Image (cartoon, helix red, strand yellow):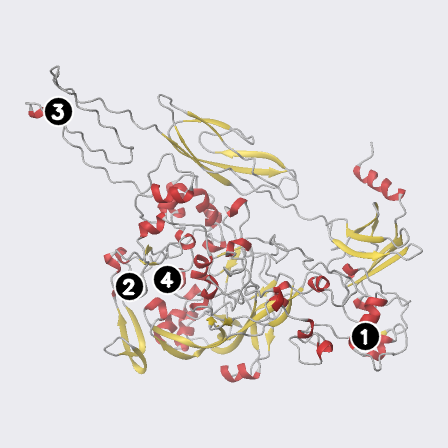
Amino acid sequence: MLTALALFDASAQAGGLDIKSASWSATYKRLTISGEADDRATVTLFSVATGRQIANVTASSGGDWRVTINQPATVPCRVRAVSNGDTDESRVSNAPSNCDSAPANQLPTASAGPDQVLMLANEMGTVSVSLDGSGSSDPDGSIATYTWTGTPDPADVVNPTLNLSAGQYVFSLVVTDDKGGRSSADTVRISVNAPPPPSPSPTPTPTPSPTATPEPTATPLPSSTPQPTASPSPSPSPTASPSPSPSPTPAAVSCSPVPTDGKTAHAECIQNYTGPEVCVTCHEKQARDMHGSVHYQQGGAFPNVTNIPANFARAGKHPAKAAGELVADGLNTYCGSPTTSPRFTCANCHVGNGRFPMAQSEFEKLPLGSEEAHKQLSNVDCMTCHQEVYKRFPNPAAGYFENMVLENVVEDQNGILSAALTGQVTRVGLKGIPVLDQVTKDFQFVPADPTNPELAGMPTAKMPITALEAARTVHPTTRKSCLSCHAGAAGANGAKRGDLSTALISPPVEMDVHMSPAGANQTCSTCHNAPGDKGEGHRVRGRGLDLRANDVSARFTCDSAGCHSNRPHGDYSATTGSSRDKHAMKVACQTCHIPTYAKVVNGVGIATEILRDWQTPQVSQTACNGRGGWLPKVEEGSNLVPTYEWFDGTSRVYYIGEVLHGGPAGDVPTKVLPSAVATSLGTTSAAYVLGAPNGGVASSAAKLYPMKEHWGKLARHKATDTLVAHSTFEFFRTGDFDTAVRNGMANTPGMASTDDYEVVPVHTYQTINHGVDSSSSALACGACHSALTGGPVRMDLKGKLGYGLRTGASAVQGTRQATLDGTFNTVCRQCHSVESSGRTFTSVHSRHVQDKRKDCAACHNFSRPERGLSLSSG
């Protein structure tokens, strides 16, 4: 019997396809592949190891074909050609030692099935229960083994069957794939309820006379409801009437069996609301999934950040960590970092209920169903995402409040703050601050229930409904529930992202065609849905380039969300300049379909922040969650034209402790301040770029994306050459950036409050992804190509973005010109004398690409091998 490879080779040799040569030139960073095929046949080339498509090429009338790929992102060890059903393979000669290899095994995903609620039949001590692991999957292979754990221990098969008595059970499933990769554990909760008690026997009564009518027997209520005692029959004896028993306190959740409709279940089964533990009673699996998410942990894996060392366990906004682990704490151009400020200042928009999350690696060690595991899960506040009107406030009943002293302000008789050279205002009670547990750093939130007398005087608005009604009317996530946090990032509506504000709760179609009720009326979860059926994985797809962690490592784009293909316009041509689908290979959809951000349409919309200066403080009546205090000066803008940058899905993002100059990842990049920004910030120094996209014109995975730019100031610690996480809380209190910086240094290992520092400008890029216009409002060609209009354009294609003429060595086979200097004189002479006089760029480009099918590398410093063009001089 032939092996698969032998069979493959045999079929390859039987056809007319043949790879004659495949070689790599380290000197010129060039991969060259040539061969023979049927006349005019299309040949597609792949990397054998990864399956990645390398190029398409069309054979000549004689069957010869040749393709050259300049500066490929990775060099294949072995290539495969496919044409008209024939295949052939060849080793790449002189391939580097780091040529691509077989892709890493993708781990399987375990699915233990949905939670179950069952009831014992009358007079039966057990019920048969089947577990279901059939929903488990492996993206690049098959499931080899199923390992169940729990008490009693299930059989290690797909669908084990157990006989369970009344009680609560948790079972865990781990699957192993055919390459030995093990999944994370998934759990299922089984509730077996006892049958309702039988009707009580009627109280014995004297034998009635023939004309007497016996008392009817009272019908018992469900076991969760207190039962009134039936009136006894008249009796001369006082002992004939039983004493009524006290009514039991109703449980938080009581419903058996649970209604199958989620809305009905919440409305009927929740008896009172004491906190997130009420949700966990029925939704432990979902709480476990959320416990490991970036939304809860405030950090996680960072597979798409290239400058954070691999020995860090996770990265994010002060992420949870286990003992001995290194984590990369974030620092940004807006609020600095939460690491040196009280937790309550940033905690309100994370799904924890006040306690600091336990690191996921530690949580997974807790026994299933243990009291400690339940305690940790009960800190996952489900209503943060699943109740539009939900609001919460640090719990005053816990005695966590202390006075908050605002410095350098005075207060008039109406409570209005104003700046003063000296003076202070003391906030007490509900305008104080919650005291954290000195060991755990925990505090606790309570719902902002309008009927809670302990919240009288709360400085921000309460909910319009009670906490119980909020719990009973929970719902899937909506635009409003997501934006209740995301719109307020950086401390103000629309401040941070530029494409997210409360205007998107119900936007006009001109603001966002996807989210407008007059358009597609989509919710955030339409695109950012978590892996798993109906998103029960509680992980979110997508990542801004300025963020470190993300739940799902795969790149998330318009054509990977399940709505659009990578050729959405249906006009692909490898050579026609006006082909929109050709542009879509290197231009992100957002570039053409989001012409402006921070949109204000007919008076509807929110401006976004573009600059923040901590050295110019401003008094605010509502800073610090309504308590009042100081804020930095900000500058805002609306209907802004984006900046355009290459982005390959990965980025460089600063973390606390990263050396600015000469670190392991090299110098932190810098950017020259525009004159208007330099005037506003009062400095001409170059800004350190804290969030920068990776990619360039020659990057195979990069596309042009629209970006927001944000500028700010931070302190640079001179001795360590690192940026300081100043205390935003001390700034809120005092309006003094020096005090905030020195407090931050005092609370940073390796620094002291008396150390020298300097204030430096900082900058970040942020991708623009929301606010999609209708197709009729998309940018036309002339918006970016001046040759078509003769007017100003949005982007510097020729200079900044790499589309200038070629320099250095020629890429053309049979070249007449060996060294190119980026001018027509040398570039044209690779093939012929200079003929560009009097010709427009459009005509020159059409002649060479559309007519002669020349690859971009003939004239530029990059190639587009996927278009199957030629680099010959003939």
**Which residue is at the front of the view, 257 or 455?**
257
Determine the image quadrant of residue 194: top left
Residue identified by numbered label 3: 233
Residue 700 percent coordinates (x, y) = 71, 61
Q: Earlier in the sequence, mark 4 or mark 2?
A: 4
Q: Residues within 10 Å of mark 3 (few under 14, many from 20)?
A: some
Q: Name the residue: 39% across, 61% down.
A: 343
Residue 249 percent coordinates (x, y) = 24, 40
Q: Residues within 10 Å of mark 4 (few under 14, many from 20)?
A: many
Q: Name the residue: 53% across, 81% down.
A: 677
Residue identified by numbered label 2: 458
Marks 2, 1: nearer the viewer: 1
Residue identified by numbered label 1: 843
The amino acid type of the residue labelled 3 equals Ser
Q: Marks 3 and 2, Cα distance to the nearest angstrom?
A: 55 Å
Q: Marks 4 and 2, Cα distance to the nearest angstrom?
A: 15 Å
Q: Residues within 10 Å of mark 1 (few under 14, many from 20)?
A: few
Q: Residues within 10 Å of mark 2 (few under 14, many from 20)?
A: some
Q: Earlier in the sequence, mark 1 or mark 3?
A: 3
Residue 834 percent coordinates (x, y) = 87, 79
Determine the image quadrant of residue 553: bottom right
Q: Marks 1 and 3, Cα distance to the nearest angstrom?
A: 107 Å
Q: Is residue 765 left or right of residue 602?
A: right
Determine the image quadrant of residue 165: top left
Residue identified by numbered label 4: 344
Q: Earlier in the sequence, mark 1 or mark 4?
A: 4
The amino acid type of the residue labelled 1 equals Ser
Residue 182 percent coordinates (x, y) = 58, 41
Give the residue furthest to the right: 62
Q: Marks 2 and 1, Cα distance to the nearest angstrom?
A: 69 Å
